[in-house]
Each structure stands twice: as structure tokens, then as C-alpha cells.
Amino acid sequence: EVQLVESGGGLVQPGGSLRLSCAASGFTFSSYWMTWVRQAPGKGLEWVANIKQDGSEKYYVDSVKGRFTISRDNAKNSLYLQMNSLRAEDTAVFYCARGHYTFDIWGQGTMVTVSS
Amino acid sequence: IQLTQSPSSLSASVGDRVTITCRASQAISSYLAWYQQKPGKAPKLLIYAASTLQSGVPSRFSGSGSGTDFTLTISSLQPEDFATYYCQQLNSYPYTFGQGTKLEIK
């Protein structure tokens, strides 16, 4: 079964750090761009970052540039999002998704809450 | 690139034909996708490249448009179609989403 499973969310204080993981199974992970999308409570979707198959290209939304880092380990079929200097406005469900121009497979999401 | 969906919410009945519009602030060719999201669930891809139906998606869903104006049409609403719909542009970074259209039962 093709599947993405996120983990690593939780409660963190403003200014803190968190690392999200996304475990892929059922497909050749190394053949796909991968993406992070987030959704603040009661709000719409926001594209956050993506990464090319070999990790050589990475793109970010302006609001997270310099604070978030996307990475991947193809040997472990895993995608990561290192989040530093977290702010209250980063509170959201974070989804990983497969693809570059089509996000055809999504994980169930992991909740990140930034609060003191 | 900003995407503006209209309407923001819509009430309709089972069997109705529904159209949702997505307008881009600049031309995006056909780099547009549509997603359906139900409460507490991840989004589901419906349409990509403006008009290509994703595998497994019922044929009552269709997409059209290019440049700046796009539409998602549901030809005959089914009970399971009541959800929020988002368009997304993939022409240039950042890949922005529309604000969403909530489709509710009348």
C-alpha cells in the first residue's frame, strides 16, 4: 500500500525547534519530489517547501525561509522538516505529500502547536 | 501569485450541478490543480493540469480553463461531495492555494 506517515509534531514554546518526519512506503521514494503543506486551525492550505528527488533543489515559502529546512534520506525512505525559531503563527497541521506538480498521495498530518 | 476562489461557500442539493471558479492574479498556463478536503482529513487530488482527472476520481468531476480563469464542475452532486475545495497553482514558487470553497448541503 502506498503510504506516507508523518510524526514529530507536538507542543513547543515560541523560539523553539522541532523536527518532523515523514515515512514513505509502497513506492520508490527516491523517484519523487516531496512536499510539505500546512494548515492552521480552521484555515486554508499553505504550501511550505519541496525537495527534488536527489535533494539538489529545495524551495520554500517566504515566511519560513531561514527558519525551516527540508531534507530527505532516500536510503531510509524518509522526508524531514527541521523547524527552528518557531512562532505562534507556525501552529498548524503539517502534511507531507508526494509529487512536484501533482500531490497525489498525502499523509494523515501531524499537529504542531507553538505556545508558551 | 494569488488565487481567488468564488464563491467562498455554497449551498446545494444532491443532484445539482455546481461550478467553482478560481482566478489567478497572473497567467499560469494550465498549471492548476483542484483538491477536495473533508473535515479532519488530508486533501485529495481531483484534477491536475487544469483538466486532467486523477485516477479513481468519479467522472462527475471536471476541470477547465487556462491562463488566469479556471473552473471545477461537479455535474451531479452526491452526498459524499460535500466538502471544501481548493485550487492550487504550480506555475511558479511559492505554489499557492486558493482560500477554499466550502460546499454545504442545502
Image (cartoon, coloured by chain):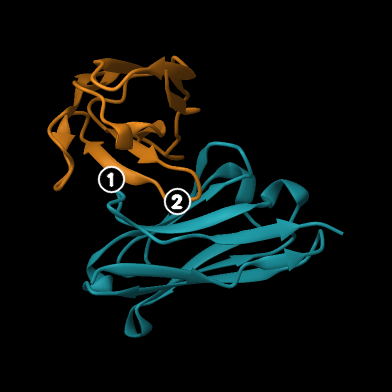
Chain colours: A cyan, B orange
Figure quadrant of the N terminus of chain B:
top left
Q: Nearer the viewer, residue A25 or A69?
A: A25
Residue at 31 percent across and 50 percent down: it is: A103
Which residue position holds label 2?
A: B41
Q: Nearer the viewer, residue B62 or A38?
A: B62
Residue A88 in sight from this viewpoint: yes
Q: Residues within 10 Å of mark 1 (few under 14, many from 20)?
A: some
Furthest toward the bottom, the residue is A75
Q: Nearer the viewer, residue A86 or B53?
A: B53
Quarter occupied by residue A99: bottom left
Is residue B14 rendered to the left or right of residue A64? left
Q: Position of residue B31 (x, y in %)?
A: 27, 33
Same subunit: marks 1 and 2: no
Quarter occupied by residue B23: top left
Q: Amino acid at mark 2?
A: Lys
Identify the subunit bearing mark 1.
A
| C-alpha gap between disc 1 and disc 2 | 21 Å
Residue B90 in sight from this viewpoint: no
Which residue position holds label 1?
A: A101
In the image, residue A63 sits, relative to residue B89, either above or below, namely below
Q: Position of residue B15 (x, y in %)?
A: 23, 20
Quarter occupied by residue B93: top left
Identify the subunit bearing mark 2.
B
In the image, residue B11 sits, relative to residue B94, either above or below, namely above
Q: Secondary structure at mark 1?
A: loop
